[in-house]
Image (tube, rainbow, N blue to C red):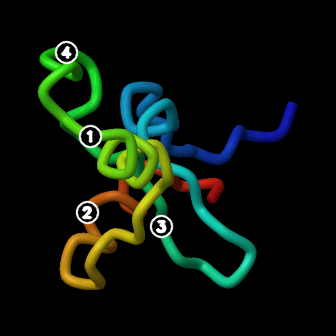
Amino acid sequence: MPKSIARRKTKKAVAKRFKVTASGKILASQSGRRHLASSKNRKRKRHLAKMKQIHKTDEYRIKANLPFA
């Protein structure tokens, strides 16, 4: 019986929070929309609903926890 190749598991906490695009960029949802929303205007909440691109200096740490992305 052949020996199995050791593989890294995907960190599920990271997989739930980040999305990798086809070009390799990493997107994450923005913070600040969960509570105390009545004091924020509609435009601000609408812009917070969109995902934002993660800075390239943080990409390595996120991709290390997503081996199949």
Q: CA distance from mark 3 to mark 4?
A: 25 Å
Q: Which-is-in-front pick, marks 3 and 4?
A: 4
**Residue that numbered label 3 is attached to:** 26
Residue 61: image x %, image y %? 25, 63
Q: Which-is-in-front pick, marks 1 and 4?
A: 1
Sequence-first tag of 1 and 2? 1
Q: Which mark is residue 41?
A: 1
Q: Are marks 1 and 2 in contact (CB under 8 Å)?
A: no
Query: What residue is at 48 percent from the left and 55 percent from the top?
Result: 51
**Residue that numbered label 4 is attached to:** 35
User: Which amino acid is tagged 4?
Assistant: His
Query: What residue is at 19 percent from the left and 15 percent from the top?
Result: 35
Q: Quick one: SS at disc 2? A: helix
**Residue that numbered label 2 is attached to:** 61
Residue 54: image x %, image y %? 33, 69
User: Which amino acid is tagged 3?
Assistant: Ile
